[in-house]
Image (cartoon, rainbow, N blue to C red):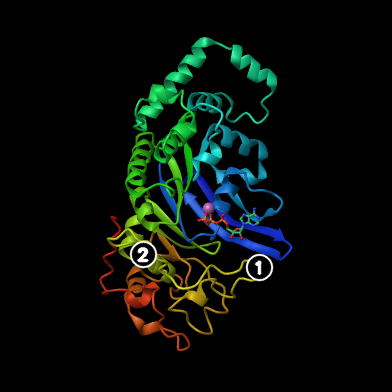
Amino acid sequence: MTNPLLEVSDLSVEFESYEGTHRVLNDVDLTIEEGETVALVGETGCGKSVTAKSIMGTLPRPPGKITSGNIRYRGTDLLANRAEHDRVKGEEMSMIFQDPMTYLSPVYTVGSMMADVATYSGNADVSWFDVLKNLLGRREERESIRERSIELLERMHLPDPEGALDKYPVQLSGGMRQRVIIAMALINEPTFLLADEPTTALDVTVQNQILDLLREHVTDRNLSMLYITHNLGVAREIADKICIMYAGEIVEVGSTDEIFDAPLHPYTRGLLDSIPKLTGFEGDGIDGQIPDYTNPPRGCRFHPRCPAAIAGTCDSEPVEAHAVGESRSVGCHLYEDGMSMDDAMAVATSDATYWSEERPPSAKAGVGSASSGTGTRETGGDQ
Ligand SMILES: Nc1ncnc2c1ncn2[C@@H]1O[C@H](COP(=O)(O)OP(=O)(O)OP(=O)(O)O)[C@@H](O)[C@H]1O
Ligand code: NI
């Protein structure tokens, strides 16, 4: 665990608007080892896509501004090295997007789009001369791109992959388009995949099929992946490690099993409680909303919604990430620095013993309804 592929540290991002400065990311730390799939999980608006865009170098600046931090890829800080960022983006990283129709052109066939990605990706300044050269270019090269496209579409279980190359995106279903998008992301054999909610728009069955395909491919090729989702159930399907994000901060990191068996942060526990059990219905498990980024709450950003907030501490003292045990960390005042896993578990699973006087346990969020002290909970996530 000493040579992470991607290491984001202390990343802070602000947006300027007429309302003032929105400090959206606040000292974000995120590490992805080689061959590891990490899920970044949090509610809408918590800063997941801003994190993704910072990594991919596509954050619109202005209005966005990276005010501190590093993004190291194989040890090189991409924020300080534009040329290396461009190279890594072109040759090693690939992104899978949420909404295929935004990224698939309606006027080109699947085959010609895949060929364009294979030919021009990573080449920031494509000239008309390049395009012409390619059009007239070597037959064998085009033939091999075509073969690679068919093979990838086959791997993505697209029926009649050869026929699909001549189709336009509107002629494909949502699930088919998402398979095409994934095949396009894989055509240049990236080492790092960044998937931003790629299955959100799909129904659960198709979503699960696509997660299976993606996981299979990532495992086969030993790829590393950052998978962004608001759905912890999806994160469990795909990820080795889960980072929970709230209002622009990473509040908990742990292996997928640890997060599910023993969630420590009250926010994580609230998210787990809102996983649909049997019905497939997604409730909004935690009362309230992400705070206003122009004026975030003092102390812990989650404290106004937290059923376990300690008055006088959580509403005023900044939170730091506390290491808990070997591989986990949690940014919450309930856990002291260096707390042993056993003590942390005692805090995590105790019922209402640490409610603040001011805030009676409100309805939905996790802590009050956490079950026994064993640290294993039924989360019913296999919807
Ligand atoms: N281009 C922009 N201009 C101004 N503010 C922005 C911009 N992009 C993002 N933000 C701010 O950053 C916040 C986080 O946005 P982000 O897209 O990262 O959320 P997210 O976690 O990806 O949510 P979702 O699950 O809905 O995709 C937004 O609420 C908004 O305040
Ligand atoms: Ni997003």
Residue designated by label 2 = 272
- Which amino acid type is marked by label 2? Leu
Picture coordinates of residue 214, whole percent (x, y): 38, 40
Picture coordinates of residue 238, whole percent (x, y): 36, 48
Q: Is residue 136 left or right of residue 346?
A: right
User: How many numbered discs, if any?
Assistant: 2
Residue designated by label 1 = 294
Q: Quadrant of residue 225?
A: top left
Question: Which element carries disc 2, helix, strand or loop?
Answer: helix
Sequence-wise first label, 2 or 1: 2
For the point 35% across and 74% down, the residue is 343
Where is 98 relative to 190, above or below? Answer: below
Q: State the separation of the CA atoms marked 2 and 1.
A: 28 Å
Picture coordinates of residue 131, whole percent (x, y): 64, 20
Image quadrant in which the C terminus is located: bottom left
Query: Is residue 264 visible in the rendered structure shown here?
Result: no
Q: Quadrant of ligand 1?
A: bottom right
Viewer-closest of 75 and 110: 110
- Which amino acid type is marked by label 1? Thr
Crowd rating for badge 1 (residues with CA inside 10 Å; few <14, some 14–19, many 20+): some
Picture coordinates of residue 308, whole percent (x, y): 43, 79
Query: Is residue 287 visible in the rendered structure shown here?
Result: yes
Viewer-closest of 358 and 173: 173
Q: Is mark 2 within 8 Å of ligand 1?
A: no
Residue lying at the far front of the rendered structure: 171
Viewer-closest of 100 and 375: 100
For the point 38% across and 38% down, the residue is 218
For the point 60% across and 11% down, the residue is 136
Crowd rating for badge 2 (residues with CA inside 10 Å; few <14, some 14–19, many 20+): many
Q: Is residue 28 left or right of residue 370?
A: right
Where is 313 relative to 89, above or below? Answer: below
Residue lying at the far bottom of the rendered structure: 357
